[in-house]
Each structure stands twice: as structure tokens, then as C-alpha cells.
Amino acid sequence: MNNINLEKQIIELIPSQTMKNAIKEYNHRFTDLEYVQLVEQFAKSWHSKLNLLNEIKENINSKDIISYIEAFVKSEHNAYDKFIKKEENYVYDIIMDCISNHDEERYLCISFDSIMKIIDSYRENFKEVINEDDFKHIKITKRKISTWNTPQEIDEVGNIDVYLNENMEMHYIYDDNYIDPEDYNLNMNAIKYPTIFKAGDLVYIDKNKHELQVGNYTDYYYSISKDKIFGIVGINQNEVYEDGDVDVCYFLNLSNQYVHFRSIGLNELQYVNYLDCHSHIDFGYIEKVNLNEIHSKIIEDYEYAKAKLIELEIIK
């Protein structure tokens, strides 16, 4: 890509300040395709994502990437048009907090225009008992109402999911029309960032910047660090596999029953139970931990978990 200002704008989207600092320190440059991936993953809203992709298209030479961007943007617009179109036998299912461990608050409405009215009414009616965190993970599904007269109908549902950001802007939209990069001779593997993490490192994810829940997650640290999800890096960053690819972060969540109750070990299948608590998370979300700035409970849990992982030969 031949636009330094656009490159800087895209890099600023990366949630991890640790990683952004490393990119600047090492003067790291991404490939054109990786800039596309960064925008798709980290753009703050749906509209800004499409605008940035169109800017990338104007500043690269790869015909394959340009064709992919054009197809992706067209597909996104088609999904949006279908989402807002009023159709018989379709409703909008609004889930106020789609990743919470708490009971879902959900509401149905029959038109796109009424969605924000319901959300605004919810905020007004429950303003004394809810906080702003409850509005960071709103999901809206356009859902078909059917009598299911034939078994085949279940494959013809055509639901469309929309996720809003904290500013009530559309963040992501998903339908059943996937644009496969391989159809454009592109392999969207994990983004290769500067190598700054290794297996065994204590790291964290900022909950305010990561929109999806981490697997097998019980927050034992809420009272001491409610905005961070702590974990251990399970595999060296940028470790190259046989096919030449690298992977995202193998994130072993520190806040779980096996660490909390000091029960990490082998299960009946001779599999390390703690590995059930991992998630695959882009390194663009991962932050380094300053051990001098965190609660002693977290340090104690980390030292226990790391020692067990070494003992069980998961890490060195």
C-alpha cells in the first residue's frame, strides 16, 4: 500500500496498546492483505469499515485483493438492504446483552424503524438499575416466523444478525452469504505482528475493547480487576507451522475453576483439563501485564498455573 497516512490510521484501530507500541518501535509493515484484515476485524463501525476498505482499494495494485474488497463490500450492502427491508413473516429479535452470563433481556418488534425506539425505551425505563456496560453487546436478529410445514423450511430461514457498538452504531452484520477469500486466490491466515509474546507470558484483554466472550469464563477477579481478562499465552507468538503459517494467540484464561481450586491436572482421557479453558484470540487484542501493578491474588494464580503447565510439559 502506498499511503502512509492510511496505514497509520488502520494501525490505530488495533485495540492493544502493547502491540501498537511494538509496531512503531520495530517499524513493522503489514502486507496489503493484512491491512484489509485489520480493518475487517477492528474498524469501530460498519460504515467506517466499508469506507476504509474502499480507501485501501484505491491505494493498492493487487487485482485479487481489489476484486475481493469489491465483492465483500457489495455483499455487506446486500445484507444491510435485506436487513432493513420490511418483509411479511419476519420480526426483529433484540437481545440487550448477547454475551452476558446473566439472563437475556430480549424484545421483538416488527419493523426496522422501531428497533431504536425499543432500545431507547429500555434504557429510559431501567436507567436506575443498569449501567452502560449493558449497551456494549446488543445483538439484533431478523428472524423468520414460520409454520415449518416441511423439513426443508428450516434450511430456508435466512436470518441476519447485526451487532451494535457502544455508540449504537452498526458494528457487524452477518448473513448466509460468505465471501470466501480463496475464491480470489487469497489466504487470510493469522496476521503476523511483531514478535513480543512467548509461551508462559501473563497477559490480559481489555473487556471494553474485545466484543466477544472468552471461552469457559467465570470472573473470579471481578472485585479486584473488573475491566481485564487475564490469561497465559499457550504457544509462542509467530511460531511457524509446517504450512508456513502462524497462529493467533492460544489464550489460556486464568480466571477458571481449575486455577481457582488448584486442580489443574490430567482428566480421565489423560488430557490436561486446563486446556479446556483456552480461546483463539488475535494478538491485536493482547496486552502485556506489569506485575508491579496487579493484585497479588492474580500473581499467585499465574505462578501456580504456569508451574503446572511446565510440569505437564505444555510449555517450557
Image (cartoon, rainbow, N blue to C red):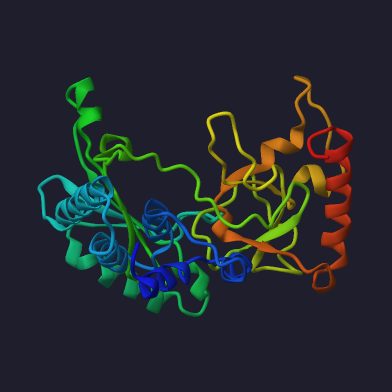
Q: Which of 113 and 196 is in front in this view?
A: 196
Q: In which quarter of the image is the C terminus?
A: top right
On screen, residue 156 versus residue 102, left or right, reads: left
Q: What percent of the width, then of the height, locates residue 212?
A: 51, 54
> In the image, what residue occupies the spot 74% across and 65% down?
289
Q: In which quarter of the image is the N terminus?
A: bottom left
10 in relation to 187, above or below = below
134 in relation to 268, above or below = below
> In the image, what residue occupies the spot 24% across and 40% down?
177
Q: Nearer the viewer, residue 109 or 157?
A: 157
Specify the quadrant of the image occupied by residue 124.
bottom left
Q: What percent of the width, then of the height, locates residue 140?
A: 32, 56
> In the image, what residue occupies the spot 40% across and 61% down?
138
Specify the quadrant of the image occupied by residue 186.
top left
On screen, residue 110 versus residue 306, left or right, reads: left
Q: What percent of the width, then of the height, locates residue 194?
A: 60, 57
> In the image, what residue occupies the spot 52% across and 70% down?
133
